[in-house]
Image (cartoon, grey):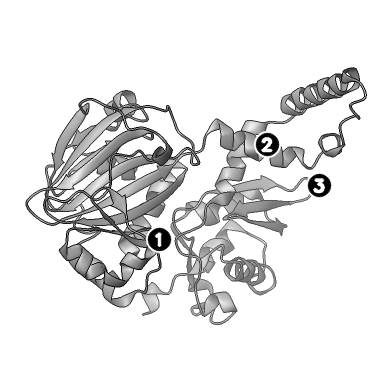
Amino acid sequence: MKSLIEILKPYTLEVFLKDHWTSKAVHIVSEETNKFAWLFSWEKLNYLLNYHQFKYPDFRLALDGQVLDKSANENWTKLCQEGATLIINQVNTLIPEIAKFAAELKYDLGYGTQINAYCSWPGKQGFSSHYDTHEVFVLQIDGPKKWYVFPDTLKYPLVEQKSKSLQAPEGEPYLSCTLNPGDVLYIPRGHWHYAVALDQPSIHLTLGIHCKTGIDFLEWLLGELRQRKEWRRSLPLRWETKPVEVYLDKLVTDLDKYIYCNNLSQEYIHYLDSLGKPIEKYSLPQQAGFNIFPKETQTRFKVPQFQRFQISELPDSSNGCKITVSGKEISIRGVSSSIVEKFFTEELFTGNDVINWLPGFDWEIDIVPLLTRLVLEGIIFVDTSIYQ
């Protein structure tokens, strides 16, 4: 939780989880005005605008409570002069500092993250009152911005349950606050809100946490049941009601037995872990098979940051294990899971370290092919930083 702790400072994680997470918005006043300056700035915004080509809706505008259509992007500078809020989606895929920040949060929290950038102008409101279907942290980068947060009208809305089809709550907001640089505003999923920039231009980042729900678990379970013939079989013809009732009762019994005999909660957690992708996926030329051992046994290796992994013994009782990481499954024979785990728990290791971990293994015959395979699969990288 190190990443979330840093966001919340000087607020404590314990108080936040107890009093606010998924239930109540909170404004956290920062002790540092430059707390998020390393993440984003006017300079980085201009870099994106000058050197990237964006397409709607990843680049869009909002003015006077309305999101403008695609045609507005053709005159976006003029519309900004008129006060339109500029939005760039998924800046975590465009700026390395934000990418690492989002990846660390995803690793710590266990769920998907997305970060969007918002640029607003004095006295203008971009969006009308609305709610989001994910947890939101607003990180104020520059300028002041006034926020208004109202209670939810639909508890824990799902992705498809958008606010545009519902009526915003009437009455006063339960939280109104002005965010200054370094401040944080947490808004729970489903809580209505809107914001207005004050007397200076404003930039903020919104960090969205896309938590899974019980519905997501059931959708995964449905996919598992598709592999069972009992659930693919046609229901009885409806000449009479009784045969259909009997068959449905059999399905309920089968589901109960399936749930009882399988550790579904653990299987689902493994499935969630398999969805995670490392922030760094590629390492050339080594991943193409070249210059993998520039220093022979002294070559240094590392594991891509912020990815979850599972290591399990092979089911046939032979000496070996299966690695599940980033949606890949790799079987390694002749090496125990306790040894393979060292590849993932050591920040850096060398060929000599592996020789020490595997006494009796030959460097050329056994270890080089093993490390080569892991490099080619993108499981581990050659650390070239010390050779540059």
Q: Position of residue 311 (x, y in %)?
A: 62, 48
Q: Residues within 10 Å of mark 2 (few under 14, many from 20)?
A: some
Q: Which of marks 3 and 2 is nearer the N terminus?
A: 2
Horizontal arrangement in the rendering, residue 214 relative to residue 319 (left or right) = left
Please determine whether, in this image, residue 286 is positioned above or below residue 306. Answer: below
Amino acid type of the residue tagged 2 in the rendering: Leu
- Around disc 1, counting alpha carbons within 10 Å, would you say few (fewer than 14), some (14 to 19), or many (20 or more)? some
Query: Can you name the residue that lies furthest to the top here?
Result: 242
For the image, the number of numbered tags is: 3
Image coords of residue 377 (percent x, y) = 61, 67
Residue 214 in the image: x percent, y percent? 56, 31
In the rendered view, would you say 178 is above or below 20? below
Q: Picture coordinates of residue 170 (x, y %)?
A: 27, 27
Q: Distance between the residues labelled 3 and 1?
A: 50 Å
Residue denoted by label 3: 316
Numbered disc 3: secondary structure: loop
Label 1 sits on what residue type?
Pro
Going by the numbered disc 3, the residue's amino acid type is Asp
Residue in the picture at 40% in, 43% down: 209
**Quarter of the rendering containing residue 165:** top left
As drawn, the label of residue 221 is 2
Cα separation between marks 1 and 2: 32 Å
- Residue 216 seen: yes
